[in-house]
Image (cartoon, helix red, strand yellow):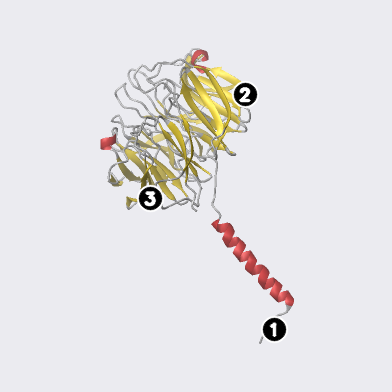
Amino acid sequence: MKIFPLTALIALFASTVLRISHSVAAEKPVVADWPHLLGPAYNCTTPESGLLRKFPAEGLRVLWEMPLGNGMGGPAIIVGRIVVFHRLADKETVECRDAATGKSEWKFDYAAPYQPRYGGGTGPRTSPVIADGRVFVFGVTGRLHCLDLATGKLIWEHDCAREYSMKPAFFGFGSTPLVMGSRVIVQIGGVMDGKPVNSVAFDTATGKLLWAAAHEWGASYASPVPARLHGRDCVLIFAGGLSRPATGGLLVVDAADGKVLAAAPHRAAIAESVNVSSPVVASAEEGKGARIFVSEVYTAGGLCVEVAKDFTTTTAWHGGDFGMYWMTPLVRDGCIFGFTGQSEQLAELACREVASGRELWRDDLGRGFGRANLLATADGVLCLGEFGELAWIGISPKGGKVIERTKLFDAPETWTPPALSHGLLYVQQNEPDRDGKRPRLICYDLRAK
């Protein structure tokens, strides 16, 4: 029998333990916050893993739920807190709760009487944004508030509608703010010093005006997103407010000073149309032209814009039948994936190649999803249908398929994107369901057991 020295045995044991610990660490689920609309990277993607891939026959476990008033904006989640923005009677209300239990921590509200000109509810239509211990909310009447995350106390506010003579909108104001560093950027579609302004930036700590992006295109319902283009930090805005004739399109704005670097028109010809889906960076390789995709469903469809190093723009390709309503598409595997169609009956999941614009496929996935939202995780892609259906789906340039599905509830207008944080899935039921349950925010346990 071979005898090993004690030092060799200790070394062998240590290396074995190290390998096991590395293996255990590798299997530990990845978790992330959801501090704003569209997820941590503003692209409907989260690095979360360790999620439940096989849905129980009895449905997903509900950890807690809270009643909701009117409003379409989803929650923001960070450091164990969830912040919700909705309307209760004539007050826009911000609520902070424990993200795991739903226990109330604080509430802030303010009078915001509003009646929509074209229906569609009384709002708000935006999501809270959490950054650096502060909460930013932009209401349907154009008021911007900055609150302390820990206490809910007001830090500063701006009545943007009054201060900048914001133009009337179809359904009130509904573009979620964007925080980049020490700036909070808001689409206003107003006037400053007698000149049209699309958006403004305020200091996040003090509320001081830092810059105004001068442009005649009004504010849309699409939320701005950040992008690094050709060595510059930029804000991508899919603009377009209520105007006759209808105008709007992609604006590329310098995040440092508000200078409009590029403008690419894209808007339906009819005035009764809205731009809602946020811009997506389709490709942005160093040394090459960046490609930005914007889309709408009122005949104009989808547009892929090439932005050169000098920030001149050209049309890379156009897809008249490749338009998304309010959902922001996914970019992966060199393709853009999104649910097209102006109505739930016409909705289909379609895939186009970024490089060529060629449509590779489209599929209704067996119906039932309507104009759905997509959410990519490290474990796969989740799909939330507009009637309360949840599914894991497989998508690639070769096709799409449903892997697993479950019914969360049966209610129309489930249009709010889902939020995922620390293995918990937050879904907003915006209308009463068939069981008579009123609008609510539901927290589902999506952690693998």
Q: Earlier in the sequence, mark 2 or mark 1?
A: 1
Q: Quadrant of residue 306?
A: top left
Residue 95 lies in quadrant: top right
Q: Callout 3: helix, strand or loop?
A: loop
Q: Position of residue 329 (x, y in %)?
A: 39, 40
Which x, y percent locates residue 75?
49, 33
Q: Which residue is mark 1?
A: 3
Q: CA distance from mark 2 to mark 3?
A: 44 Å
Q: How far apart in space, not on screen, are marks 2 and 1 (Cα)?
A: 70 Å
Query: Looking at the image, how many numbered discs can be counted on the residues?
Result: 3
Q: Residues within 10 Å of mark 3 (few under 14, many from 20)?
A: few
Give the residue number, with chain letter if any, for mark 3: 57
Query: Mark 2 or 3 closer to N-term?
Result: 3
Q: Earlier in the sequence, mark 1 or mark 3?
A: 1
Give amino acid for label 1: Ile
For disc 1, the neighbor class at 10 Å (few under 14, some 14 to 19, many from 20) is few
Q: Residue 220 at what x, y percent from top left?
A: 41, 25
Q: Are marks 1 and 3 in contact (CB under 8 Å)?
A: no
- Residue at the left extreme, as displayed: 345
10 relative position to 59: left or right: right
Q: What's the amino acid at mark 2?
A: Lys
Name above or below for residue 210 compared with residue 403: above
Residue 178 at x, y = what percent? Answer: 52, 30
Q: Residue at x 38, y 25 (%)?
A: 248
Is residue 155 among what the camera can see? yes
User: Regarding mark 1 in the picture, which secondary structure is present there?
Assistant: loop
Image quadrant occupied by the N terminus? bottom right
> Amino acid under label 3?
Ala
Residue to which mark 2 is pinned: 153
